């Protein structure tokens, strides 16, 4: 999927290859508008910041307490400490730097990394139709630069594979962050649509029918007010309902849920089975299933297209209300974040550190 702000509103989602031209056109138009105003920007995909900064730090902090001796030693050797929270937002800061803002905007390491890996903004997500039964590598909706491939690439680097200009520290930063992202349902599942003669949208869940259709880029194009969109609501709005906007407080909230009584009453994938090198595929599959809950209780209204009839915005309404929608989805948000912490620790404990 992932939370504080998951994908920040202007990110473009990875889609099938035959949608490439449409996406590039959308990106080009946005860049031209900014350049026309005299601004300078680097055109990288930039979904919302899954779980937001505080959410990512909280997930990482809660995972720290679950590290075993092997996991702690591996992290310590690379990081010099086990303070995972300190590195949890580096990949999002990297995206901001590519757009000319944020704490890394003049950082030489960030500048070089964005130059060497210009598609790293796409590593934060994969856009699967809501009816997708499982993530399929080399399928019509996967991509070599999607989040599943990025997580697996970080694992390979940490386990000894040498990748030019990609250090183990950078791999650890990305791994900590992306495990959070993949558990945000809207970093994995997205709505695809067809439109009638009056441009009324109908949500398409079937993958075969969704192929080639416009999508809402992980809820970034679904607005429930003039400026509030669904993706950001799952990134930050719901997260703040859990324990405010302080990451230490939120981490304590997540850690308190990691007990048999709560887990038994909240079904989840608490221990991912099988080879850890395929865990990211299982997590993506779980998140697209969870994304179906995200879209429940939503009705679709007015649609806005650009001059080329590319989708820009769909107005949505919550039935019966935003308050009711929030109340009914707080548990799902909690489960996703607790799973992210548990799975991050389990993966770090399982790695064959080199």
Image: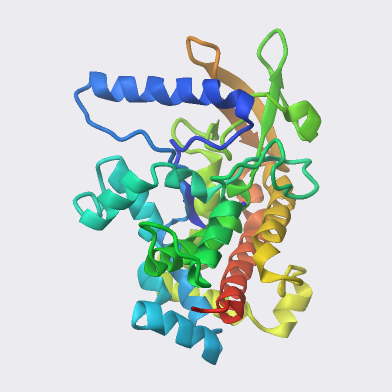
Residue 293 screen position, x and y as percent? 72, 49
Dividing the picture into quarters, in which one does residue 335 lie?
Answer: bottom right
Q: Residue furthest bottom?
A: 69
Q: Residue at x 55, y 50 (%)?
A: 234
Q: Is residue 201 visible?
A: no
Q: Is residue 101 above or below residue 217?
A: below
Q: Is residue 39 above or below residue 330?
A: above
Residue 229 screen position, x and y as percent? 51, 38
- What's the colour scheme? rainbow
Q: Is residue 287 above or below residue 21?
A: below
Count of numbered marks: 0
Q: Residue at x 73, y 43 (%)?
A: 296
Residue 233 screen position, x and y as percent? 52, 47
Q: Residue at x 55, y 66 (%)?
A: 155
Q: Residue at x 67, y 47 (%)?
A: 294
Dividing the picture into quarters, in which one does residue 221 lie?
Answer: top right
Left or right: 89, with 272 as reference point: left
Q: Is residue 110 visible?
A: yes
Dividing the picture into quarters, in which one does residue 218 lie?
Answer: top right
Residue 281 screen position, x and y as percent? 69, 57
Left or right: 38, with 67 as reference point: left
């Amino acid at each position: 999927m992932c939370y504080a702000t998951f994908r920040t509103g202007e990110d473009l989602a990875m889609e099938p290859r035959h949608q490439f031209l449409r996406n590039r056109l959308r990106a080009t138009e946005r860049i031209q508008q900014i350049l026309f105003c005299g601004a300078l920007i680097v055109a990288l995909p930039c979904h919302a910041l899954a779980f937001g900064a505080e959410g990512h730090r909280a997930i990482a902090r809660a995972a720290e307490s679950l590290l075993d001796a092997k996991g702690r030693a591996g992290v310590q050797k690379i990081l010099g400490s086990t303070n995972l929270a300190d590195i949890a937002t580096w990949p999002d800061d990297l995206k901001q730097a590519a757009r000319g803002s944020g704490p890394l905007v003049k950082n030489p390491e960030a500048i070089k990394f964005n130059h060497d890996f210009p598609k790293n903004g796409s590593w934060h997500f994969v856009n699967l139709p809501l009816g997708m039964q499982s993530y399929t590598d080399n399928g019509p909706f996967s991509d070599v630069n999607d989040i599943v491939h990025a997580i697996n690439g970080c694992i390979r680097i940490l386990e000894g594979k040498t990748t030019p200009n990609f250090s183990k520290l950078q791999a650890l930063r990305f791994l900590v962050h992306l495990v959070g992202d993949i558990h945000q349902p809207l970093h994995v599942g997205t709505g695809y649509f067809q439109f009638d003669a009056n441009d009324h949208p109908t949500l398409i869940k079937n993958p075969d029918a969704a192929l080639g259709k416009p999508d809402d880029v992980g809820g970034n194009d679904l607005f429930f007010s003039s400026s509030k969109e669904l993706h950001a609501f799952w990134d930050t709005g719901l997260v703040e309902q859990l324990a405010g906007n302080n990451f230490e407080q939120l981490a304590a909230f997540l850690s308190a849920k990691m007990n048999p009584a709560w887990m038994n009453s909240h079904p989840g994938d608490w221990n991912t089975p099988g080879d850890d090198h395929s865990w990211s595929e299982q997590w993506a599959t779980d998140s697209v299933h969870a994304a179906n809950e995200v879209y429940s209780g939503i009705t679709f209204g007015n649609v806005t297209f650009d001059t080329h009839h590319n989708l820009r915005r769909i107005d949505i309404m919550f039935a019966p209300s935003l308050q009711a929608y929030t109340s009914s989805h707080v548990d799902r948000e909690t489960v996703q974040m607790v799973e992210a912490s548990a799975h991050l620790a389990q993966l770090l404990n399982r790695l064959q550190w080199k």
